[in-house]
Image (tube, helix red, strand yellow):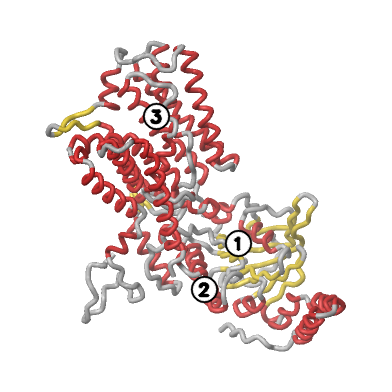
Amino acid sequence: MTAVVPETATPLVRLTDAGKNYGNIIALRGVTLEVSGGEVTCVLGDNGAGKSTLIKIIAGLHEHTSGSYEVEGEAVHFSSPREALDHGIATVYQDLAVVPLMPVWRNFFLGNEVRKGLRMDIGFMRETTKKELLDMGIDLRDVDQPIGTLSGGERQCVAISRAVYFGAKVLILDEPTAALGVKQSGVVLRYILQARERGLGVIFITHNPHHAYPVGDRFLLLKRGQSIGYYRKSEISRDELTALMAGGAELEELSHELESAGGASADAAKILGEEVHDLGIDRVSTKEAP
Amino acid sequence: MSSTLETRPGPPPPAASDERVARQSPLSRLLARPEVGALVGAILIYIVFFIVAPPFRQPESLSSVLYVSSTFGIMAVAVALLMIGGEFDLSAGVAVTSSALFASMFAYQFTLNLWVGVAAALVFALLVGFINGYLVVKTGIPSFLVTLGTFFMLRGLNLALTKAVTGNVATNDVSNMDGFDSAQKVFASSFTIGNVSIRITLLWWILFVAIGTWLLLRTRLGNWIFAVGGSAPSSRAVGVPVNKVKIGLFMGVGFLAWFMGMHNLFAFNTVQSGGGLGNEFIYIVAAVVGGCLLTGGYGSVIGAAIGAFIFGMTNLGIVYAGWDPDWFYFFLGALLLGAILLNSFVRKRAEAMR
């Protein structure tokens, strides 16, 4: 803990060589990751790469079994999400932890209701919800509408601004763009940048390098429970990132398999082969981060 | 909110309004509330019986209807809150009888003041509620099944214990025991306004509905009730004590079952051990007709009260109209079906109006 050379300040969250075993199953090992305020760290990996396990460790749902986990330089062992929250680490899960049938303002303050004596201070909560969402750039029509009537992107943003309002210093976003269309994803990416500008540390979990690269400052790549690379933005290009993610070698293998199957599969194999070849050529028009 | 003004050219609208909100007439805003379907139904049914059944128009008849409604409506308050919290209680009907039996036999056998029996029955009823709730949250088994089990257990207990203790199917008359008069004043008295006799349960009903709806809409607990019924995992993730809320709701049913049990005891002086059977469904019908979703997360206590009023009107209205009362359950079923169809329509609108 003492001998670590600080880069600028102590990072908000630092995992060093962290791992997690479930009995004899090694779900994650040797992961090192840092998030400082005003920084976005992207965690990339395919299904089963260990992303969920990593989030669960950081969010306090599971304890790590090896390595160390530090929050603002202090070694921690969380045994519940509440403890992580008390340290300012908030997680926005894929299902967003919202109740679709409840009004936006009731969702915003759920679990943190503001009270005046026995009653809730409904006026304050309504206004605050409206104002906080406006600060995040969402001009909501009516905070009394059920949150289920908002679009997926808007719902993400409500969940994010809720975490920010209740004092999150580090935001963990679990695949926030996975279920969204192109435009909605763009909206969510914008809010990630906004959270970063507000000085929050963001851990952005995704399997889409095109979403990660424009907003990320650091990139951690996971595969089969292990880190296969940890880069600063200056150290890697988007195409390298894409190639690493796609696993060029595996695609090639797949294309051979399809080819040997003949027929329609052979056509698919040809297309796949071309794709593999094309990795490394810029063909995606994602906008660069400012 | 500020839907009082129609659009008119001139000064910009106040900050509260927004040009993207299509002007919503007060009517369509009202229609979005859960209890509206029930209210419209209640008015229609009232008009129908007012026309076809002359005795229905008498104030005394209304008083009787309100009495019957209150005996079901009081339980419907707790059952509706439980349903909004996402759970069922099939043991609610027999739990009323169990409480009455418990109070009566406890006080009688130990020759105590009846109030001691009343207090002991309260503990018993809350315990039944707690056990229901605890089993549901700890096992994760649907409350429908858990409370089906406790329903049969209580039913058996009622019959078997009563027979074992009194040698009879009913308890002994308690009307000359200590504390009877004061307890009857609280639970089962009546008073007159003008020349119409009104039962005290009506006042209790109004009180419980007022408390229930205030709890649900204005307090943190209410927020949690909606949340645990709407999505328990999400509620847990933001720190809502889901298990405590659910157990509390079951205990709320226990509390009002105790209250109704005391009413039955002091209104009839003796308790039939086989009573209360089937009432659990009427409570649920009242809640559903009043706009509660069977799946939880949505509903209204006032709606459940209107549902109970519809039940009371139909129950007595058929008699006043001189129809064969055997038709009653047919109407009840039809009402329920209609209400469910309306509710599912409302829910679809609420979840996917874009």
Q: Nearer the viewer, mark 1 or mark 3?
A: 3
Q: Residue B206: name its quadrant.
A: top left
Q: Residue at x 62, y 60 (%)?
A: A71
Measuring from the top left, give residue A221's x and y in whole percent: 72, 71
Image quarter where the C terminus of chain A lies is bottom right
* The N terminus of chain A sits in image quarter: bottom right
Residue flagged by tag 3: what amino acid is it? Trp
**Distance from label 2 to label 1 (Cα)?**
24 Å
Secondary structure of the residue carrying tag 2 is helix
Q: Nearer the viewer, residue A65 or A21?
A: A21
Question: Circle 2 is placed at which residue position?
Answer: A191
How many C-alpha atoms fall within 10 Å of the one at disc 3: few (<14), some, or many (≥20)? many
Lateral position of residue A103 relative to residue A254, left or right: left
- The residue sitting at 44% across, 51% down in the picture is B293
Callout 3–callout 2 Cβ contact below 8 Å: no
Find residue A61 and report its horizontal and vertical position in percent: 63, 53
Three-letter amino acid code at the position of disc 2: Tyr
- Relative to the observer, which residue lies in front, A13 or A240? A240
**Residue A118 visible in the picture:** no
Q: Which residue is mark 1?
A: A72
Residues at discs 2 and 1 in contact (Cβ within 8 Å): no
- The chain containing the residue under callout 1 comes to A
Reading the image, the residue beneath label 3 is B258
Extreme residue toward the left, this view: B194
* Amino acid type at mark 1: Glu
In terms of sequence position, does the residue under pointer 2 or pointer 1 come before the other?
1
The verdict on a common chain for dots 1 and 3 is: no
